[in-house]
Image: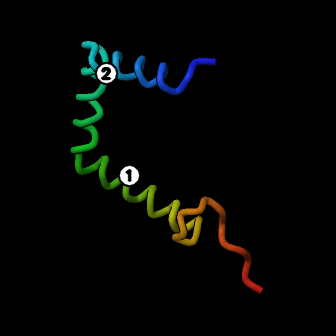
Amino acid sequence: MPSLFSKAAKLAAYARSPQGRKVINQAKELANDPRRRAQAKEMLNKLRDRTGGKGEGNPPPPPR
């Protein structure tokens, strides 16, 4: 099984490649799109509502 460091090195090499730079630029453009930001914020709020805002990933216990 490859070590974490070898995986990180491969990822860094990909990020420096022309294809990697293209993907990074596309991600930056999408992140700066106001509509996409609103979608991401809405999804984050839905997740927070499901977890009770604690960020633990577990739904709150049912009321008694």
Q: As shown in the figure, which amino acid type bears the numbered disc 2?
A: Ala
- Measuring from the top left, give residue 48's x and y in whole percent: 51, 65
Disc 2 element: helix
Viewer-closest of 17 and 4: 4
Left or right position of 47 against 41: right
Please give the residue where the numbered disc 2 appears in the rendered image.
15
Alpha-carbon neighbours of circle 1 within 10 Å: few (<14), some, or many (≥20)?
Answer: few
- Measuring from the top left, give residue 51's x and y in whole percent: 59, 66
- Measuring from the top left, give residue 26's x and y in whole percent: 26, 29
Viewer-closest of 45 and 4: 4
Left or right position of 41 against 33: right
Mark toward the start of the polypeptide (1 vs 2) = 2
Alpha-carbon neighbours of circle 2 within 10 Å: few (<14), some, or many (≥20)?
Answer: some
Residue farthest to the top, as pictured: 18
Q: Quadrant of residue 43?
A: bottom left
Q: Residue at x 31, y 47 (%)?
A: 36
Q: Residue at x 22, y 36 (%)?
A: 29
Please give the residue where the numbered disc 1 appears in the rendered image.
40
- Measuring from the top left, give residue 14's x and y in whole percent: 35, 17
Q: Quadrant of the N terminus?
A: top right
* Dot label at residue 21: none
Viewer-closest of 43 and 4: 4
Q: As shown in the figure, which amino acid type bears the numbered disc 1?
A: Ala
Disc 1 element: helix
Q: Measured along the vertical axis of the image, is residue 8 above or below residue 59?
A: above
Q: Measured along the vertical axis of the image, is residue 48 above or below residue 32?
A: below
Q: Quadrant of the C terminus?
A: bottom right
Distance CA(mark 1)–CA(mark 2): 24 Å
Q: Measured along the vertical axis of the image, is residue 43 above or below residue 62?
A: above
Left or right position of 33 against 12: left
Mark 1 or 2, closer to the camera: 2
